[in-house]
Amino acid sequence: MGQLIRTAEALLQAGDLGRCELVWGELSMMLPTGGRHGRLAMRIGHALADFVDREGLGEVLAAETGFLLARNPDTVRAPDVAFVRRGREIGDGFIDGPPELAVEVLSPGDRRGYVQEKVAEWLEAGTNRVWVVDPSEQSVTVHVLDREPWALGVDEILRGGPVLPGFELLLARLF
């Protein structure tokens, strides 16, 4: 790498470093994901994009889209899938501020503490909802600021709540 990357601007101009995020001014490398992870992220992204496009609500963004969550030290995170409401600026750089919805699909090697830290950062930055998709449990846990998270099983319906009113996905279709 050879260069010190501590700011969102330095990360954006660094070129292809592979999968990484900037967490409180420190570069955090991420391993490529496996096939099941990619399939689940695509399925949930596809369901969200169909709904969001049909309703004209905004944009659904794929993994690798960076969101600038904090400054001094800078934090740029990239969820597996994100929704941003209509009217938000989406340009070539990182998106300023958090998405309205962040989706994280667990990989086999993810540590629970790491995932909980990421969920807390999304919520504290202003993300309305975070969905954590657990392939091994065939469940989705919904996280909302100042509420206990709740898990939905394979036979339940994932709803968009106030972020995506009317969105429903039977989790059996996801898994």
Image: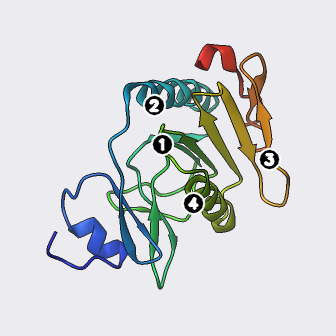
Residue at the image position 77 percent from the left and 52 percent from the top: 144
User: To which quarter of the image does residue 58 belong?
Assistant: top right
- Mark 3 or mark 2: name the one nearer the start of the chain: 2
Q: x%, y% of residue 172?
A: 67, 14
Circle 3 SS class: loop
Side (left or right) of 26 relative to 114: left
Tell me residue 21's x, y (percent): 39, 61
Which of label 3 and label 1 is nearer to you? 3
Q: Nearer the viewer, residue 75 or 85?
A: 75
Q: Which residue is mark 4?
A: 98
Q: Badge 4: how crowded within 10 Å, few (<14), some, or many (20+)? A: many
Considering every residue shown, the one lying at the far right of the view is: 147
Q: Are marks 2 and 4 in contact (CB under 8 Å)?
A: no
Kindly indicate whether the residue at mark 3 contacts the one at mark 4 (C-beta within 8 angstroms): no
Q: Is disc 3 in contact with disc 1, using a CB cutoff of under 8 Å?
A: no
Secondary structure under tag 4 reads loop
**CA separation in Å, label 3 and label 1:** 19 Å
Q: Gap in Å between the C-alphas at discs 2 and 4?
A: 22 Å
Mark toward the start of the polypeptide (1 vs 2): 2
As shown in the figure, which amino acid type bears the numbered disc 2? His
Q: What is the number of the mark on residue 153?
A: none
Please determine whether, in this image, residue 8 is positioned above or below residue 38. below
Q: Residue at x 44, y 65 (%)?
A: 76
Residue at image mark 3: 149
Q: Which is closer to the viewer, label 1 or label 4?
A: 1
Of callouts 3 and 1, the N-terminal one: 1
Residue position for label 2: 37
Residue at (67% x, 63% y) in the render = 126
- The amino acid type found where label 1 is placed reads Asp
Badge 1 vs badge 2, beta-carbon distance below 8 Å: yes
Query: Mark 4 is on which residue type?
Result: Pro
